[in-house]
Amino acid sequence: MQVGMVGLGKMGANMTKRLLDGGHQVVVADLSAAAVQAAVAEGATGATGVADLIQQLAAPRVVWLMIPAGDPTERMIEQCAGLLSAGDILIDGGNSLYKNAVRHAAALKPLGLHFVDVGTSGGIWGLKAGYSLMIGGEKDVVAYLRPIFETLAPAPDKGWGHVGAAGAGHYAKMIHNGIEYGMMQAFAEGFAILRKKDEFAFDLGEVARIWQDGSVVRSWLLDLIAAALQRDQQLERIAAYVPDSGEGRWTVAEAIDLNVAAPIITLSLQARIHSREDGYTEKLLSVMRNQFGGHAIKTEGE
């Protein structure tokens, strides 16, 4: 099957290579000419831009977007809508808000265009291990795209599936990332407690290695932790600053809207936000304790 891939960041480039290795024809476009040339070297066909990419595709055209969520995706979908023809398929594989996917599908339908939202997980490891694909859209359109999904997934019958109408794919990925926040926070806190127990002088890399097999907490995240801790347990060169992609926030907002308690995911998001603060909250807490109870205030450098 022929696919047009717009966006050759690390994930888009790896997905392109996996499609090429699976025998698909891929036409690529990116703001970076070097990224396009790198994909061409792997066997893709290069395009000078989106208009050129679409022109090189045979109908029904399949255009897969792997670009940042928000304005870049909005602008690209608008541009593609003016270039595609009835029966063509536009796929958003980025981390877009599910409400936008619902809106895009509705807006493109009168034009005869099909919109598919694919929540994509796998990160930089997807090239080797395959991607987990949560797919929203029309059932018959998803069935038509099956060869692409089977190639990108870990196996033809594993790691991918049609989860519902347009928007459902990104919704499932949003919740997936919220769960991921909670799991990561629990691992980080647990290893922090182990590290503080001076009397046992735990080898954290060794503990992680033991847990990798047979333990109920064994997981890919633990595998990544083990690899990191075996290289450097002190993490002295790592800044205590943790960004969030936005999907954790959307998950928490959705839980509130649906009146569903989600304290673990919510607190894990708050922990990430806290990592980016300047400590003013804690400073004010210390001042209050001093004011009402005469508790000592620890100054910088003490």
Image: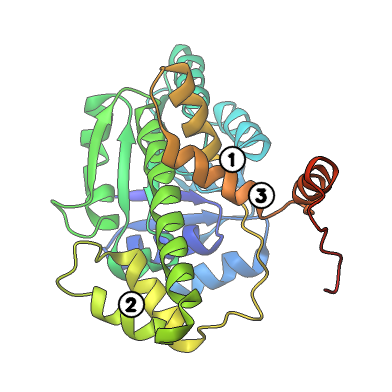
Three-letter amino acid code of the residue under disc 2: Ala
Q: CA distance from mark 1 to mark 3?
A: 24 Å
Query: Mark 2 and 1 residues: CB-CB less than 8 Å, in contact?
Result: no
Q: Amino acid at mark 3?
A: His
Q: Is residue 98 visible?
A: yes
Q: Residue furthest front?
A: 294
The answer to whether 250 is drawn above or below residue 288 in the figure is above
Type of the residue with mark 1? Ala
Q: Callout 2: 10 Å neighbours few (<14), some, many (20+)?
A: many
Q: Which mark is residue 208?
A: 2
**Looking at the image, do the residues carrying marks 3 and 2 touch, with CB atoms under 8 Å apart?**
no
* Above-or-below relation of 275 to 37: above
Asked if marks 1 and 3 touch (Cβ < 8 Å), the reply is: no
| Percent coordinates x, y for residue 108 in the rendering | 48, 19
Q: Quadrant of residue 32?
A: bottom right
Q: Seen in the image, is 251 located left or right of residue 220? A: right
Q: Earlier in the sequence, mark 3 or mark 2?
A: 2
Instruction: Find numbered disc 1 in the image and state the secondary structure of the residue it sits on.
Output: loop
Callout 3: SS? helix
**Residue nearest the viewer, comparing 242 with 114:** 242
Q: Which residue is mark 1?
A: 69
Left or right: 293, with 149 as reference point: right
Q: Give residue 295's position: percent from left, percent from top.
A: 78, 53
Label 3: which residue?
A: 274
| Residue sitting at x 85%, y 74% | 301
Residue 220: horizontal and vertical position, in percent? Answer: 31, 66
Residue 164 in which image quadrant: top left
Spatial separation of the CA atoms under disc 2 and disc 1: 34 Å
Quarter of the figure with the C terminus: bottom right
Looking at the image, is mark 2 or mark 1 earlier in the sequence? Answer: 1
Residue 59 circle label: none
